[in-house]
Amino acid sequence: MSLRARVAQRGMDPRTPSALETGRADLQAHRAAEAGAAGASGVAAGAVPAGGGLTGLRRAAAVAWKDLLLEWRRRETVAAMVFLACLTAVLLGFAFGGRGEVAPAVLWVALVLGAVLGVSRLTVAEAEQGTLEALLLYPGAREHLFWGKWAALTGLLTALAAVLLPLVAVLFGVAAGPRWPLLAGTVLLGIVGLAAVGTLFGALALHVRGRELLVPLLLLPLALPVLLAGIRLTEAILGTGRVGPWPAVLAVFDILFLLVAPILFELVVEEV
Amino acid sequence: MRLVGLAAVAALVAGLSLALWASPPDAFQGDYVRLMYVHVPSAWVAYLAVGTAAVASLLYLWRRRPAYDHVAQGAAELAVLFTGLALATGMIWGRPVWGVWWTWDARLVSTAILFLIYVGCLLVRGLAADRERGARLAAVVALVGALDVPIIHFSVLWFRTLHQTASITRREVSMAPAMLAALLVNLVAFALLFLYLVALRARLARLEAERAEAALEPLPR
């Protein structure tokens, strides 16, 4: 049974789901699967039917689906991220006089600042609603939890970029023209790396006082290579700069943190 | 350990006297060049401290022996101290020689970023719920920070140099032997000082941990 069906059956208002509810659904689904009741209930939000053991990919997909579903119902985090990013773009644009050549810098600064707002939300919401324990009760490696959270964060940031890119293009009168797939690819590469570091620090923020306050302080200095590489690549795509070594910088950053962050994530979330 | 401390003091005295009296003033910079004997060793020791913190953090996350954590804590604090010192002396040196307090030079920016990352590392430890968790989280930050340093350094370097010609390049320094000797003595002195301070700080952290445990003991009676 899918979560949606479950919610409908109980007559709950589907617009106000609780993460607790989803977490319990996850746990029940998982227990059912463990007991060998194959096919009795869908895993998590019904993304995939349970047939025996859960593969890592399906676990990660279930976590990501749950997070994105919750976010889709409320749209709180993404709205705040988009608002802050747009505000940053407008303020910086006004301060710099809206010249086209600052557009890449404004785009990336706004993107990174908007991302900071959303990074800790996914994990902190779990802790606030008391569902983190349920997630951590799953047997097996926590690496899949990381990948699920990472995929959800990547989705959020992609949504942010999808709003921000046209806005910056309009505000600063620049256009990527036929090279827009390159620009989208660059932004996506940046987002992938940001999400990897962000997921790690979002989990880290759970265990310190003041939670979200610490995330910008940790994330912004570390994210500097993404910011710089993104700015230069965007300039190159808009025809005002050279490509140089920047694709390699982005790729190295992404690969390094996609390899390291899942390992460190397990150390960070252990024994809540 | 006391020997290391005494050696550090002796080397510092020797380095200071060499720097202030024995070495000649620079042909272009005059006496300002003497700041180099503090600035360059600070920067080198800052990198040494970052490396030590990263290795100790890795060992701690792997083996979970508290001793590694105490070293990591000391090294992270010293990393903040020496990057701060390098930045401050660099600014003081830059003002009379370059005419500006600050320039967006790659080395300056990456040192400043390194300073911020390790301040974050100390913050995480201080704000964590308990000692063991603080140790674990600070180790993660120290490790991630150290891994990111090369990428940050090269991205900052290329960001400036590939776009516009660097406005200020450091003068090629082919040093007089007396200056080189003074610099090397000061390097050794700072390295010894670092060793001594790390050892002291690690000992202090161990004593603090023991005391915290001792304070907990009478309770379950």
Image (cartoon, helix red, strand yellow):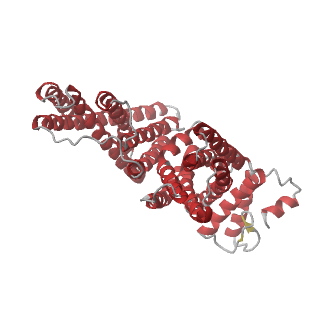
Residue A272 visible here: no
Q: Which residue is drawn at the image coordinates 33% and 29% (left, top)? A: B99
The answer to which image quadrant residue A28 occupies is bottom right
Residue A111 visible here: yes
Q: Is residue A96 left or right of residue B176?
A: right
Q: Residue furthest right?
A: A11
Q: Which residue is drawn at the image coordinates 42% and 45% (left, top)? A: B142
As rendered, which of A33 and A236 lies closer to the eye? A236
Q: How many marks?
A: 0
* Placement of A251 over or under A19, stated as above or below: below
- Residue B94: percent from the left, percent from the top? 32, 31
Q: Which residue is drawn at the image coordinates 61% and 42% (left, top)? A: A93
The answer to which image quadrant residue A21 occupies is bottom right
- Residue A81: percent from the left, percent from the top? 67, 46
- Residue A219: percent from the left, percent from the top? 52, 45
Quadrant the N terminus of chain A occupies: bottom right
As rendered, which of A68 and A47 lies closer to the eye? A68
* Placement of A78 over or under B204, stated as above or below: below
Q: Which residue is drawn at the image coordinates 33% and 46% (left, top)? A: B51
- Residue B205: percent from the left, percent from the top? 38, 35
As rendered, which of A119 and B93 lies closer to the eye? B93
As rendered, which of B1 and A229 lies closer to the eye? A229
Q: Is residue B29 left or right of residue A248?
A: left
